[in-house]
Structure formats: structure tokens, C-alpha cells
Amino acid sequence: MSPQTCPERRRRICVDASIALKLVLEELDSDKAHALWASWVAQAVEIIAPCHVAFEATSVLRKHASRAEITPEAGRVASEAIDAQGVKLIHPDALHERA
């Protein structure tokens, strides 16, 4: 393909659960996570994560709720907010073998 016909590749960022959680909980450096996220959205960056991030985030939210650091309702709302972030969850073949 010539450069004129090559589709432009979209930049990707792979995030972990800590970034997703900083966006929905008040934590150290949450403000930095919000600024990063806003810059990625403004640049139309594709945000991806390994599929296990959803389980990790849920586990952390449940732990916060069980310690009464957040209410169960706040945990549910935070979980829904994480789901709404638009992160593309990926599961590459043999991911666990390469880790």
C-alpha cells in the first residue's frame, strides 16, 4: 500500500485497574488520572485493557465496601462508571503464557 492509501493507525494506551479505579474513587493521584484520561479522550486514543482488569476493579470495590470505606451502593455506581469508561477489554491468545 502506498502512504496515501494506508489508513491512519489509531494510538492505543493499555491501562490497568488502578487507573480505572482512580477515575471513580478519591485516591492519591486521582487528579492525575483524570488529566491523563481527558488528554487521551481529546486525542482520540483507543484505551484498551486486559480482560482481567474488570475482575480486579470489582474485587477492589468489594473490598472497599466490606471495610465500610464506601457503601455497597457507591461500589455499584463506581462499577457502572468503570464499565461506561469505554475501555476495550482484550484477551489475546496465550496472554497468560506470555505474562
Image (cartoon, rainbow, N blue to C red):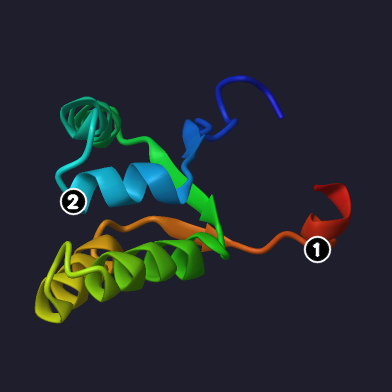
Residue at the image point whose x is 27% and y is 64% from the top: 64
- Residue 32 at x, y = what percent? 22, 25
Task: Please tell me in which quadrant of the rendered image residue 68 appears.
Answer: bottom left
- Residue 92 at x, y = what percent? 73, 59
Residue at the image point whose x is 48% and y is 63% from the top: 56
For disc 1, the marked residue is 93
Rendered view: 38 above or below 93:
above
- Residue 1 at x, y = what percent? 71, 30
Whether tag 1 and tag 2 are in contact, CB under 8 A, the answer is: no
Q: What residue type is labelled 1?
A: Asp
- Left or right: 93 as drawn, with respect to 63: right
Camera-side residue: 95 or 44?
Answer: 95
- Single out the residue that lies furthest toward the right: 97
The kind of secondary structure element at disc 2 is: loop
The kind of secondary structure element at disc 1 is: loop
Residue 25 tag number: 2
Residue 60 tag number: none
Q: Residues within 10 Å of mark 2 (few under 14, many from 20)?
A: some
Q: What residue type is labelled 2?
A: Leu
Residue at the image point whose x is 40% and y is 45% from the top: 18
